[in-house]
Image (cartoon, helix red, strand yellow):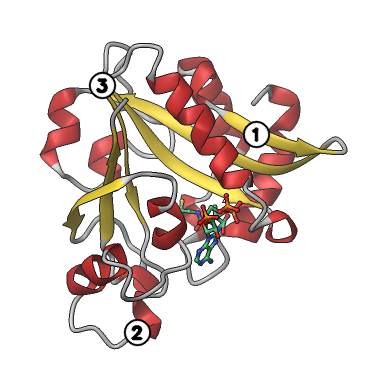
Amino acid sequence: MELRHLDGVVALQTLCFPPPFDADLLWKHEHLRRHLELFPEGQFVGVSDGQVVASCSNTLISEIDWHAHRSWDETVGGCFLENFDAEGSTVYGLDVSVHPEFRRRGVAKALYQARFRLVETGYSRYGTACRLPDFIHNHFPTAELYAWAVSRGEVEDRTLTPLLKMGLTMTDVLTNYMEDPESGNAAALLEWRP
Ligand SMILES: CC(C)(COP(=O)(O)OP(=O)(O)OC[C@H]1O[C@@H](n2cnc3c(N)ncnc32)[C@H](O)[C@@H]1OP(=O)(O)O)[C@@H](O)C(=O)NCCC(=O)NCCS
C-alpha cells in the first residue's frame, strides 16, 4: 500500500463492512497515513487495472499484549494504532477486505501469503481476532459455541470460514472484543506460526 492507494482503500471499506457494522471503525485517510508511517511493510493492497480491489492492514504488538486477550481497542490502541510496538513479536491483522466482485478467486489468500511472508522475516506469529458476522443468523446460545462449531466445520461463517482456510488455528473466543452486534460483540482468536 502506498499513499496513492488510500482513496481506493477508504472506498473499499464501505463496500466490505456495510451497516450494522459501526462506520466509526472504518479506516479514514488519516488512519491509513499513520499506518504507513508506523509500519509501511505491513500494509498491502490488491490492484486490478489500476483499481484497488483488496487491502489488508497490520500492526505489531508485544508478546504481553498478544497473550492478554483484551478488546480490539486495548490490543491495538484504536484506529491510529497507539499500541504499536516496533519491537513487537506479533504481526497483528487488522482487516482483510476484498471487493465483492473479486471474491472467491483467491485474492484474500494472496494477501494472507503476503502476511505470512512478512512473519517469516523474523516475527513469532501472525495473530488476529476474527468477526463472526453470521452468528446473528444462526441459533446458537452463545457466540463462543457458534465459533467453535464453525471451527469444527459444522456451520459456515462468511468471515471465519475463509480465514480458517488460510491455515489459521483458532485458539480462543474473545467476548466483548468490539461493538459488533452481528458477532454478538465476540471474535475468534486466530494464530499462524512459521
Ligand atoms: C472474507 C473475505 C476477505 C474473503 O475474500 P476472498 O478473496 O473471497 O477469499 P478467497 O477467494 O481467497 O477464499 C479463501 C478460501 O475461503 C473460501 N471462502 C471465501 N469466502 C467464503 C464464504 N463466504 N463462505 C465459505 N467459504 C468461503 C474459499 O472458497 C477459499 O477456500 P479454499 O481454500 O478451500 O478454496 C471477503 O469475503 C471479504 O472481503 N469480506 C468482507 C470483509 C471481511 O469480513 N473481512 C474479514 C474480517 S476483517
Q: Quadrant where the N terminus lies?
A: top right
Kindly report which numbered mark, 1 or 3, lies closer to the viewer in this rendering.
Answer: 3
Give the structural element (helix, strand or loop) at label 2.
loop
Q: Where is residue 80 in the image (x, y as percent from the top left)?
A: 43, 32
Whether label 1 touches label 3, CB < 8 Å:
no
Q: How crowded is mark 2: few (under 14 residues within 10 Å), some or many (20 or more)?
A: few
Q: Earlier in the sequence, mark 2 or mark 3?
A: 3
What label does residue 127 carry, if any?
none
Q: Where is residue 73 in the image (x, y as percent from the top left)?
A: 29, 44
Q: Residue type at mark 3?
A: Ser
Looking at the image, residue 70 sits to the left or right of residue 184; the answer is left
- Residue placed under numbered mark 1 in the picture: 45
Residue shown at 28%/72% (left/top)? 184
In the depicted structure, whether residue 119 falls above or below residue 136: above
Compute the Cα span from label 2 to label 3: 35 Å
- Residue placed under numbered mark 3 in the picture: 124
Quadrant of residue 126 within the rendered picture: top left
